[in-house]
Image: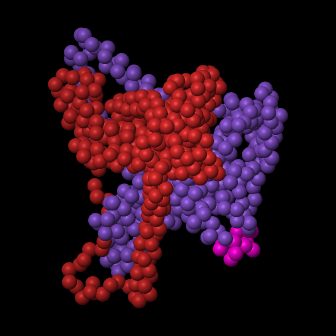
């Protein structure tokens, strides 16, 4: 039967006729197949359980506040009951914290990662391009709690705080930069988030930029373009959807990041327009209050988790669909 | 596959190409863009350099033998160490590895060797999606499922390991899948030609051929798992003492202890947190580099 090797990505079929379907051990193959198939479906089971368990846990809060009421409610008063919902649960301050920190992170990391990716593919001398991109990827391996520690105890007092005070002095009339500068707050959390999502975005954009067809670039050079013109008029426009996908995967990371944000955002329950203000993100609020909370509050935290899960899923699935349509070139960079 | 570079080809001596392209302003733009891009690269490298420098500087004085063998005193007092955290991390990671790596590789085997079909493509898609699930949500899920839910198991080592395993599973699966795809079909056909059954082909030919790559993926997943903090806060819960129970008592871990140490106001506790950061960093980087090294040496699947 299977004398011809099929297309590369597909494993060849095992022979079907002959001794292999009869005799001793003929059940081994089907059993093996069902075992690995069962292992494979575990992913689906886990995801289904995730949705079911957390939604049922969070249901009482959604039932009391209403789903949208929960999302836009500004008051979070934790109740101490074991059996019923007595507090008021509105997640808006935390949703705002998540959004604003992620937006800051993307605003900083997106241009930077595009520039780094272009540098690595078009400008870097051959010899250092590879070590450089390894080093950037190493940044992705650093655990987020180390980013938090470093951000809180070194980067904040030594770099960010002086910068913020200068910014507040220069731009304090502008509502985003209104004082007082407390140190921790939305802006430092966003900046450290930007550092954290930079590697994954760079990795994806680098791969997208690197596979752009050489012929077009050569044609542009032949027409007398400078390198800058080739990059901005040929390479980047063609990479647009890949860049969007990278931004969305980075956004997904930023939305769900917990520990580093928790250590830098300040942990208050209010919200305000100033980027220097303190607040909480959805993830950081869960982690910060979980330890001391009553069973009722944990229901509320579960509801925040469900909302966070929904948002990140939408962002991630959109990103994945874009990446999948681009082809299979984003290997482990996306992991 | 080298992915780099498209420097303009140095054309053969022709009068026009003696001059760089463009008018003065365009040339100026090109030149300044080069400077800006290089500056961006340098800027992107700075945080890593700063982190390595600072973690080493503050951590190196704290890490000694006591740091690994003693438990932590109250944050105000100097000395002592993170023994409880190290034991907990080792315990949790061992269980998580046992749970995630066999299932991850089996999933990849199913996707590559028995696919593509409807089920495998949905498994692939949801594995991809799963890499993007916030870690805190995984913690909430395991809390809801095992700590208070159907299991009602309470906080402990095992539930912490389940959470870490859920984080690691998609990473293992994705990388194992790619590695299995790199195994040439000639090997499979040769095995069939010798009369092997499919399962024999997979177990005796495909998996050994992909072994270095599978090791790489697993080690990268472990490197990711070691540093996870958020899911453990909700499942293992943390402990300052050495816990040997598999379930029933809250368990500690280095990243959790580091987080708590960094959040309190006493200098001695913060110093220990830097020490833990150094250990964690070295561990993660070591795993990452060794994994890449094994991967690049692999006979199949050099990329």
Quarter of the rendering containing residue A187:
bottom right
Of all residues, the one furthest to the left in this rendering is B194
What residue is shown at x 20% (from left), y 80% (from top)?
Answer: B12
Residue B59 can be seen, yes or no: yes
> Toward the viewer: A131 or A204?
A131
Residue A320 can be seen, yes or no: no
- Magenta residue check for A172: yes
Magenta stretch bounds: A166-178
Main SS, magenta region, reads helix
What residue is shown at x 63% (from left), y 29% (from top)?
Answer: B144
Q: Position of residue B173 (x, y in %)?
A: 41, 37
- Magenta residue check for A175: yes
Left or right placement of residue A307 versus residue B169 in this view: right
Colour applied to chain A:
purple
Colour applied to chain B:
red
> Toward the viewer: A197 or B55?
B55
> Toward the viewer: B261 or A205?
B261
- The image shows residue A162, relative to residue A87, as above or below, that is below
Left or right placement of residue A98 versus residue B216 in this view: right
Q: Position of residue B206 (x, y in %)?
A: 26, 32
Q: Position of residue B177 (x, y in %)?
A: 36, 38
Left or right placement of residue B144 versus residue B282 in this view: right
Left or right placement of residue A296 versus residue A217 in this view: right
Quarter of the rendering containing residue A126:
bottom left
Q: Position of residue A195 (x, y in %)?
A: 52, 59
- The image shows residue A223, relative to residue A140, as above or below, that is below
What residue is shown at x 76% (from left), y 53% (from top)?
Answer: A270
- The image shows residue A185, relative to residue B205, as above or below, that is below
């Amino acid at each position: 039967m299977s004398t011809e090797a099929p297309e590369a990505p597909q494993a060849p079929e095992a022979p079907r006729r002959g001794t292999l379907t009869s005799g001793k051990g003929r059940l081994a193959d089907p059993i093996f197949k069902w075992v690995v198939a069962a292992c494979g479906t575990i992913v689906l089971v886990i995801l289904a359980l995730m949705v079911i368990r957390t939604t049922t846990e969070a249901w009482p809060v959604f039932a009391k506040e209403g789903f949208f009421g929960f999302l836009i409610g500004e008051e979070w008063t934790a109740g101490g009951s074991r059996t019923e919902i007595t507090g008021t649960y509105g997640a808006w301050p935390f949703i705002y914290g998540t959004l604003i920190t992620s937006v800051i992170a993307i605003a900083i990391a997106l241009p930077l990662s595009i520039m780094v990716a272009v540098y690595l593919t078009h400008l870097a001398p051959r010899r250092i391009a590879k070590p450089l991109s390894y080093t950037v990827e190493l940044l992705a391996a650093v655990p987020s709690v180390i980013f938090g520690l470093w951000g809180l105890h070194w980067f904040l007092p030594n770099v960010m705080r002086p910068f913020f005070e200068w910014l507040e002095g220069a731009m304090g009339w502008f509502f985003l930069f209104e004082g007082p500068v407390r140190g921790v707050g939305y802006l430092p959390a966003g900046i450290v988030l930007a550092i954290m999502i930079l590697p994954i975005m760079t990795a994806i954009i680098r791969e997208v930029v690197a596979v752009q067809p050489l012929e077009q670039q050569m044609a542009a050079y032949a027409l007398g373009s400078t390198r800058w013109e080739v990059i901005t008029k040929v390479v980047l426009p063609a990479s647009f959807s890949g860049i969007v996908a990278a931004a969305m995967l980075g956004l997904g990371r930023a939305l769900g990041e917990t520990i580093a944000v928790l250590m830098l955002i300040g942990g208050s329950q209010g919200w305000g327009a100033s980027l220097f203000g303190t607040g909480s993100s959805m993830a950081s609020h869960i982690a910060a209050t979980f330890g001391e909370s009553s069973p009722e509050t944990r229901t509320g935290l579960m509801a925040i988790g469900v909302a966070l899960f929904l948002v990140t899923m939408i962002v991630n699935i959109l990103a994945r669909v874009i990446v999948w349509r681009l082809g299979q070139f984003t290997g482990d960079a996306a992991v | 596959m080298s992915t780099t570079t498209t420097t303009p080809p140095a054309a053969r001596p022709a009068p026009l190409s003696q001059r760089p392209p463009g008018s003065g302003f365009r040339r100026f733009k090109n030149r300044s863009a080069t400077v800006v891009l290089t500056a961006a690269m340098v800027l992107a490298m700075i945080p890593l350099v700063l982190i390595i420098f600072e973690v080493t500087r503050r951590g190196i004085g704290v890490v000694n033998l006591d740091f690994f063998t003693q438990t932590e005193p109250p944050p105000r007092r100097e000395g002592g160490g993170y023994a409880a955290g190290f034991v907990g991390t080792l315990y949790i990671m061992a269980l998580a590895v046992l749970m995630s790596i066999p299932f991850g590789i089996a999933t990849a085997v199913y996707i590559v060797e028995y696919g593509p079909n409807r089920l495998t493509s949905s498994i692939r898609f949801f594995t991809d999606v799963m890499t993007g699930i916030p870690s805190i949500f995984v913690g909430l899920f395991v809390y809801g499922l095992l700590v208070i839910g159907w299991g009602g198991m309470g906080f402990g080592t095992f539930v912490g390991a389940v959470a870490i395993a859920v984080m690691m599973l998609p990473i293992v699966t994705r990388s194992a899948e790619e590695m299995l795809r790199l195994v040439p079909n000639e090997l499979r056909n040769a095995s069939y030609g010798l009369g092997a059954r499919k399962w024999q082909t997979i177990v005796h030919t495909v998996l050994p051929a992909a072994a270095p790559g599978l090791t790489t993926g697993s080690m990268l997943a472990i490197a990711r798992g070691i540093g996870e903090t958020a899911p453990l806060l909700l499942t293992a819960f943390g402990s300052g003492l050495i816990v040997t129970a598999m379930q029933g008592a809250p368990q500690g871990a280095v990243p959790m202890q580091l987080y708590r140490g960094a959040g309190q106001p006493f200098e001695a506790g913060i110093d220990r947190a830097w020490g833990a950061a150094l250990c964690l960093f070295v561990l993660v980087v070591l795993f990452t580099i060794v994994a890449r090294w094994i991967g690049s040496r692999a006979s199949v699947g050099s990329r």
